[in-house]
Amino acid sequence: MKVLVIGSGGREHAICYAFSKSPRVANIYCANGNAGIASIAELVAIKPDEIGRLADFAESKGIDLTFVGGETSLALGVVDEFEGRGLKIIGASKAAARLEASKAFAKDFMKRQGIPTAEYAVAASPAEAIEILEGGRFGEVTSPVVVKADGLAAGKGVVVASDRLEAIAAINELESLVGAEAASTIVLEECLFGREVSLILFADGESFALMPPTRDHKRIGEGDTGPNTGGMGTFTDDSLLSSQQTAEIIDTVIRPTLKGCSDEGFRFRGILFLGLMMTEAGPKVLEYNVRFGDPETQAILFRLDSDLVDICEAMLEGRLGETEIKWRAGSSACVILAAENYPAKPRIGDVIKGLDQAAAHSDVVIFHAGTNLDENGSFVTSGGRVLGVTAVGDDLESALEKAYASASEISWPGMQFRRDIGKPAGN
Ligand code: AMP
Ligand code: GLY
């Protein structure tokens, strides 16, 4: 069969990799991909926001199955467009994508459905947000307050402000950080405390299947310092959630979310990502994403022992509940190698050394996030996050050891990475 993957980062490389393992897949196409993805897929020069062109391509190529990587295409309605033309596609509909595309919508949805989340207020302008804070309409703001841009902001739209003054500064700066559209509505949230866990699941509208729990390391610097990034590394490990905690998340978050979506007229079929804070009062939702995480996907899919095509078909046919999904036992880790000056304005165009030696390590796969080929055919950096060195192991320690041993072979001027992925302090 012919498969199309939409997107161009490490996540999409991992999705193409999982499809490349399937004996049922003859051809993989990736729009628009990157130089690393080109080793396993044919690149298609169509951007994720060109949804009409993507559907035209799928029709003319006779694509049997399309998998959407990122939120941009989903929020624009790529799934509705494909389904309207009778094309098979995995991803959330435009209506369901509002759970990610609008934080205000997601918060109101959780409130309506009784899903545990932080207290919040929604402001229609920066001035109103400040008025809410100043006027005490958002309680007595003595503790930290979280300021969020409503719209899609590629991970840059959230500031955890330690006091009222910092919160006001954050409100005033939000527009320049994420643009006027994403910041036109602002969500203020109570700050939650606890351990963060991400739980991603396949959903077919009724039933669901969990993937191994993961933790992301969002800050650029070791020990959780510096600005937020798209994610500097991640790991999967079953010990992140006890079976009791998982059962609680299923009861209080997952079932009510899927039922809520159906009750409100937009069945959720696709990948649902729950960003959770494990508070003393139980799990609370920090955010929904309607797609795989990046780099969580790299660590998750490297452990997938089942055929991704079979899982996709079960999702499309509403058979997920009866489908057993097998995962490699143990743990996995993904260490992101980023360009100099990421996340601000990364330097690009540097030749990457040591890739072949790094890839020769056993139990390791290197996913490309931002690479290109120069005129000599050498891989060069072309984005902020460049590579995701991903390893599996019988336990977390061995997965991390393998990922770091492989990463140590790779270099380019200004390369940066965190050495504390998987460590308790690194959150
Ligand atoms: P989000 O994009 O909404 O997941 O926010 C990005 C990061 O900000 C999360 O991973 C948390 O580390 C932090 N964050 C978001 N909301 C809250 C909250 N209500 N309390 C504490 N931290 C938060
Ligand atoms: N790594 C977090 C995300 O993909 O949103």
Image (cartoon, helix red, strand yellow):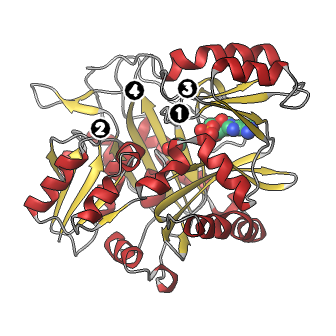
**Which amino acid type is shown beneath numbered disc 3?**
Ala
Q: Which residue is at the front of the view, 380 or 322?
A: 322
Q: CB under 8 Å between callouts 3 and 2?
A: no
Reply above or below: 292 against 207: above
| Residue identifier under label 1 | 155
Rendered residue at 43%/67% (across/down): 304
Rendered residue at 30%/34% (across/down): 354
**Which amino acid type is shown beneath numbered disc 4?**
Gly
* Front position among marks 3 and 1: 3
Q: Which residue is at the front of the view, 144 or 193?
A: 144
Report, in whole angstroms, how far the alpha carbon at label 3 lies from the one at label 2. Answer: 40 Å
Q: Secondary structure at mark 2?
A: helix
Report, in whole angstroms, how far the alpha carbon at label 2 lies from the one at label 4. Answer: 17 Å
Report, in whole angstroms, how far the alpha carbon at label 3 lies from the one at label 4. Answer: 23 Å
From this viewpoint, is residue 197 visible? no
* Front position among marks 1 and 2: 1
